[in-house]
Image: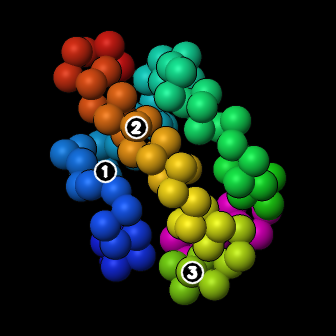
């Protein structure tokens, strides 16, 4: 499903989604992540801030409501922003790096 949405805009990464989710839910690991330039670059983006502030969109994300997310203009804006997609991938690469180094 993900590949059908973003196509070739970002390359595949090697960390599985379950592990990524576990890392984000661990306060120690999440705090380590928040200290990175890659995280700060991403959360400083207006498009990301708009999504994080929108209760309806956040509920759709939490509930994994893919049909509603795909028709949500704020979520669509995320998928259309090539620079933002690159920042997401850069953050993901940083997570892999930190995990491999045992820093998170």
Identity of the residue drawn at 52% across and 71% down:
64
Please check the rendered image and state whether residue 57 is part of the magenta-colored stretch, yes or no.
Answer: yes
Residue at image coords 65%, 37%:
43
Q: Is residue 10 left or right of residue 73?
A: left
Q: State whether the magenta stretch is mostly helix, strand or loop.
A: helix
- Mark 1 and mark 2: Cα distance apart in space: 18 Å
Q: Is residue 85 above or below residue 74?
A: above
1 and 3 marks in contact (CB < 8 Å): no
Using the numbered discs, state the Cα–Cα distance from disc 1 to disc 3 in whole angstroms: 22 Å
> Is disc 3 placed on a helix, strand or loop?
helix
**How has the structure been colored for display?**
rainbow
Examine the rendered structure and indicate whether residue 71 appears above or below residue 80. Answer: below
In front of the other: label 1 or label 2?
A: 2
Quadrant where the image shows the N terminus: bottom left
Q: Which residues are magenta?
A: 55-65
Q: CA distance from mark 2 to mark 3?
A: 23 Å
In this view of the protein, which residue sits in the foreground, 24 or 33?
33
Q: Quadrant of the C terminus?
A: top left
- Among the two numbered marks 1 and 3 on one chain, the one whose residue lies closer to the N terminus: 1
Q: Which residue is mark 1?
A: 18
Q: Which residue is mark 2?
A: 90
Work out whether residue 22 can be spotted.
no
| Callout 1: SS | helix
Marks 1, 3: nearer the viewer: 3
- Which callout, 1 or 2, points at the residue further toward the start of the chain? 1
Residue 19 percent coordinates (x, y): 29, 43
Residue indicated by mark 3: 70
**Badge 2 vs badge 3, beta-carbon distance below 8 Å:** no
Residue 66 falls inside the magenta stretch: no
């Amino acid at each position: 499903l993900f590949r059908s949405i973003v196509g070739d805009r970002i390359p595949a990464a090697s960390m599985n989604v379950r592990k990524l989710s576990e890392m984000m839910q661990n306060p120690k690991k999440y705090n380590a992540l928040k200290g990175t330039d890659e995280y700060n670059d991403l959360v400083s983006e207006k498009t990301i801030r708009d999504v994080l502030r929108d209760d309806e969109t956040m509920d759709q994300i939490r509930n994994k409501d893919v049909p509603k997310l795909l028709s949500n203009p704020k979520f669509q804006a995320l998928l259309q922003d090539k620079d933002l997609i690159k920042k997401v991938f850069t953050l993901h690469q940083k997570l892999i790096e930190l995990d491999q180094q045992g820093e998170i």
